[in-house]
Image: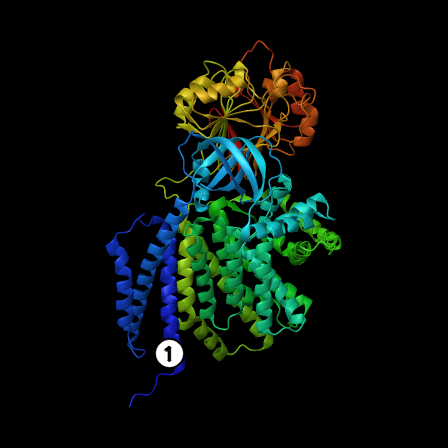
């Protein structure tokens, strides 16, 4: 007589096929962007028939392990097929909802602002939901205040998005860019649930602005609402260099951190485990609408809730099931989500927290009472360390950056992060009720925010705070993760062994039991499957598998064009930018051809004089140029650009031009200055070029004695006006402290350039000086190890 199968075995069997089905569906959803637009009827009909056949052929609970594993593999494949078809339908629905029109068509669109306006270079991008579908409105002119949910009317010309942001916009369901010449706010507002959320968010924004200094208020909006548009660019750069930038965006890591740091507080007040879990989930439910409930915030809420449930689950399999469910849910909403860097970093952080935070907290907090402030701080440090380490390979892949100060910066900021987030949330919640004063909360919060800003400033200051590390291929990222996991695991095991030695529990039996538990297939099977799926998704997107190794750094070439200027900046991962084209006959186009440059992200004309713009026509005829950029308004340059099919773009003070990781920020002239009878040299465009740790100040012909600029410290100075006398040069050198100065000047020129007083000021400032009339073309190469100069073309 057969004995009945234990209930635990039956439960394990049911969990097994559910896990396999979910894993398959998740993988299928991730592959859905490659699905055909319309699968054939036979393919669609095959799915339900396959599911029925699969259910009918399910092996008995007492089946041989090989048969059970085979059946689970088939379940996963069928799930992948289902996810692939369903995800493909979802992708098609998202794409069908986008506004699509003929490029170049002049249109007028009315709709509602669906996201916080973002500045990109000299443009402001506004996501607009219109009746015809979502579209990105790009505006160069200053904009009035455009609240999320507010109605606007935009007139302009439709265009296809630039290649560098097309994929990101596609993930948001946007297919076209409206380059608007006019944007007018309307009287209407969104209605329904979206309108209610808009009101909640607007009241939270107003609450965070009351009773707090401007700097801290901008940080509070970043911490709580994910709005970093008001943060000073220099402060944002300090947060990036110190690896604290994740605090300025709402992510699954931040939501999980918020809940985990609130967990000890719930324990101190005496809540049970179930009550603490419910309270934390309620915290997420409040947080998501207060922050605007946008797609990224919804995703962060799902990830944070799943990570919280996973961290508190009794069984390892339940933890990984919760995490896999979060991946499937976010991909069901948008199958292209896995290509988003924020999605990848959030999952990597949560996985790191699940793998290591509990063990690290147990090691560091051994003997410390569980319900104590010290234990809460130790557990917060463990969570921070696990998340920071787990995201390092992806940071290196996507941004080619590694911050040696990341761990100390995050650990030093940790004691203030939780109070800043809690107080910000309380202020946002209290701001929904006009009778509740928020000023005391904001005053207290400003102290914590000021401390975090100071930590970012301190740890971003060293030159080595951010170094370049490249992981360009799937294999390099996989290898980095493998080394990371192995190293952390060995380190944790060593610390656990030392802890056992200190406790006098160094028995061989205990060690064997620990090893057996770690190596058991039951404990490793689920985590291994989830890790492979999630890791595959994390490293799938955005890889460029090239036969030749990519360039390792930025190359700046000060071309030898005689008495004129022409500087080529070549970032390793994007199209080059040419600043000025030299005088007529300089053959800059031939030099570009020799260097293999057949397209440019932009040609920047500092000012319309022949020694700087004389070769523009030849460059536009021989090279594909996306944009022609200028400073003071110049109808002639604008007309030349339009005639060549390039986009004219005015770049004024504070504007930015980007190509990959290369950023050109304009310091002069102000946007309100118009072309007049003033000396054109005084209206010359002045920019700072930044790439990773390297910076170069390009003065054009604007002499420091005539233009009020403050570039901050730079590595290299391109001396203005071919080295002519400049009364403000000594003050500029004192503030900018360049190590090298380059002078683009013609040999035996009739102007006497460079002036003796200019060379004297450079010698007095101990600045090494390179001249094209003496050394020819000058190349400056910057990479992870630093930067160096070469003459003769480099």
Viewer-side residue, 42 vs 577: 42
Residue 777 appears at what percent x and percent y? 49, 23
SS category of the residue bearing label 1: helix
Q: Position of residue 24 (x, y in %)?
A: 36, 61
| Number of numbered discs visible in the structure rendering | 1
Considering only vertical position in the picture, is 113 above or below 651?
below
| Front one among 189 and 306 | 189
Locate the N terminus by quadrant.
Answer: bottom left
Which quadrant holds residue 41? bottom left
- Furthest toward the left, the residue is 42
- Point out residue 150 in the picture as x, y percentages from the top left corner: 58, 43
- Is residue 268 rendered to the left or right of residue 295? right
Which quadrant would residue 609 be assigned to in this image? top right
Residue 739, above or below 382? above
The chosen color scheme is rainbow
> Label 1: which residue?
10
- Which residue is rendered at x = 37% and y = 60% of the image? 25
Residue at the top extreme? 750
**Residue in the foreground of this view, choosing between 458 and 580:** 580
| Residue 571 in view in this figure | no
Position in image of residue 657 (x %, y %):
53, 32
How packed mark 1 is, by other alpha carbons closer than 10 Å (few <14, some 14-19, many 20 or more), is some
Is residue 27 positioned above or below 703 on the image? below
Q: Residue 714, can we see it?
A: yes
Q: Is residue 248 toward the left or the right of residue 355 in the image?
A: right
Residue located at (43% from left, 53% from top): 538
Nearer to the camera, 497 or 173: 173
């Amino acid at each position: 007589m057969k004995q009945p199968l234990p209930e635990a075995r039956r439960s394990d069997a049911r969990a097994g096929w559910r896990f396999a089905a979910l894993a398959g569906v998740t993988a299928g959803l991730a592959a859905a962007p490659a699905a055909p637009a319309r699968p054939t009827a036979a393919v669609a009909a095959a799915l339900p028939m396959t599911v029925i056949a699969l259910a009918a052929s399910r092996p008995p609970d007492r089946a041989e392990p090989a048969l059970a594993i085979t059946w689970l593999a088939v379940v996963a494949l069928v799930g992948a097929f289902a996810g692939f078809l369903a995800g493909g339908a979802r992708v098609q629905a998202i794409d069908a909802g986008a506004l699509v029109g003929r490029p170049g068509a002049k249109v007028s669109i009315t709709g509602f602002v669906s996201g916080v306006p973002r500045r990109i270079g000299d443009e402001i991008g506004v996501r607009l939901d219109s009746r015809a579908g979502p579209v990105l409105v790009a505006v160069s002119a200053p904009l009035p205040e455009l609240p999320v949910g507010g109605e606007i009317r935009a007139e302009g010309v439709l265009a296809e998005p630039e290649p560098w942001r097309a994929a990101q916009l596609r993930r948001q369901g946007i297919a076209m860019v409206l380059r608007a010449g006019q944007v007018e706010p309307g009287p209407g507002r969104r209605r329904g649930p979206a309108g209610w959320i808009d009101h909640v968010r607007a009241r939270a924004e107003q609450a965070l602005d009351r009773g707090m200094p401007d700097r801290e208020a901008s940080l509070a909006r970043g911490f709580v609402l994910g709005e970093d548009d008001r943060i000073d660019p220099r402060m944002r750069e300090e947060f990036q260099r110190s690896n604290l930038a994740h605090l300025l965006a709402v992510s699954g890591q931040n939501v999980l951190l918020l809940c985990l740091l609130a967990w000890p507080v719930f324990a101190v007040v005496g809540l049970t485990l179930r009550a603490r879990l419910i309270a934390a989930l309620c915290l997420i439910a409040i947080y998501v609408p207060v922050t605007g409930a946008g797609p990224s915030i919804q995703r962060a809420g799902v990830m944070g809730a799943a990570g919280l449930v996973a961290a508190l689950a009794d069984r390892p399999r339940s933890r990984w099931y919760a995490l896999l469910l979060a991946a499937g849910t976010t991909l069901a909403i948008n199958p292209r989500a896995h290509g988003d860097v924020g999605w990848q970093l959030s999952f990597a952080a949560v996985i790191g927290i699940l793998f290591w935070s509990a063990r690290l907290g147990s090691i560091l907090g051994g003997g410390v009472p569980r319900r104590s402030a010290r234990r809460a701080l130790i557990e917060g440090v463990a969570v921070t360390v696990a998340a920071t380490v787990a995201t390092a390979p992806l940071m290196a892949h996507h941004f080619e950056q590694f911050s040696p100060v990341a761990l100390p910066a995050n650990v030093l900021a940790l004691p203030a992060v939780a109070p800043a987030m809690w107080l910000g949330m309380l202020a946002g919640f209290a701001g929904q009720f006009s009778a509740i004063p928020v000023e005391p909360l904001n005053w207290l919060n400003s102290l914590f925010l000021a401390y975090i800003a100071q930590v970012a400033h301190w740890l971003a200051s060293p030159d080595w705070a951010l170094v370049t590390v490249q992981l360009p291929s799937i294999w390099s990222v996989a290898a980095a993760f493998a080394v990371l996991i192995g190293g952390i695991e060995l380190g944790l095991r060593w610390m656990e062994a030392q802890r056992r030695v200190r406790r006098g529990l160094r028995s061989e039996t205990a060690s064997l039991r620990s090893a057996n538990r770690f190596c058991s297939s039951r404990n490793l099977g689920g985590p291994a499957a989830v890790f492979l799926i999630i890791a595959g998704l994390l490293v799938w997107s955005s890889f460029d598998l090239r036969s030749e190794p990519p360039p390792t750094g930025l190359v700046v070439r000060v071309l030898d064009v005689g008495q004129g200027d022409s500087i080529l900046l070549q970032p390793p991962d994007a199209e080059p930018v040419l600043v000025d084209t030299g005088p007529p006959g300089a053959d800059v186009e031939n030099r570009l051809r020799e260097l293999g440059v057949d397209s440019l992200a932009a040609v920047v004309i500092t000012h319309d004089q022949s020694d700087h713009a004389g070769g523009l026509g030849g460059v536009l005829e021989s090279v594909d140029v996306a944009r022609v950029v200028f400073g003071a308004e110049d109808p002639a340059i604008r007309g030349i650009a339009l005639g060549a099919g390039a986009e004219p773009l005015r770049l004024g003070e504070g504007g930015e031009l980007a190509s990959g990781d290369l950023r050109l920020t304009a310091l002069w002239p102000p946007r309100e200055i118009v072309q007049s009878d003033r000396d054109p040299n005084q209206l010359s465009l002045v920019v700072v070029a930044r790439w990773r740790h390297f910076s170069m100040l390009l003065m054009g012909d604007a002499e420091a004695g005539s233009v009020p600029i403050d570039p901050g410290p730079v590595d290299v100075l391109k001396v203005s006006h071919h080295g002519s006398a400049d009364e403000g040069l000594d003050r500029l050198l004192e503030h900018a402290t360049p190590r090298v100065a380059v002078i683009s000047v013609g040999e035996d020129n009739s102007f006497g350039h460079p002036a003796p007083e200019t060379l004297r000021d450079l010698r007095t400032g101990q600045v090494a000086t390179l001249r094209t009339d003496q050394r020819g073309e000058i190349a400056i190469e910057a990479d992870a190890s630093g930067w160096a100069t070469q003459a003769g073309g480099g």
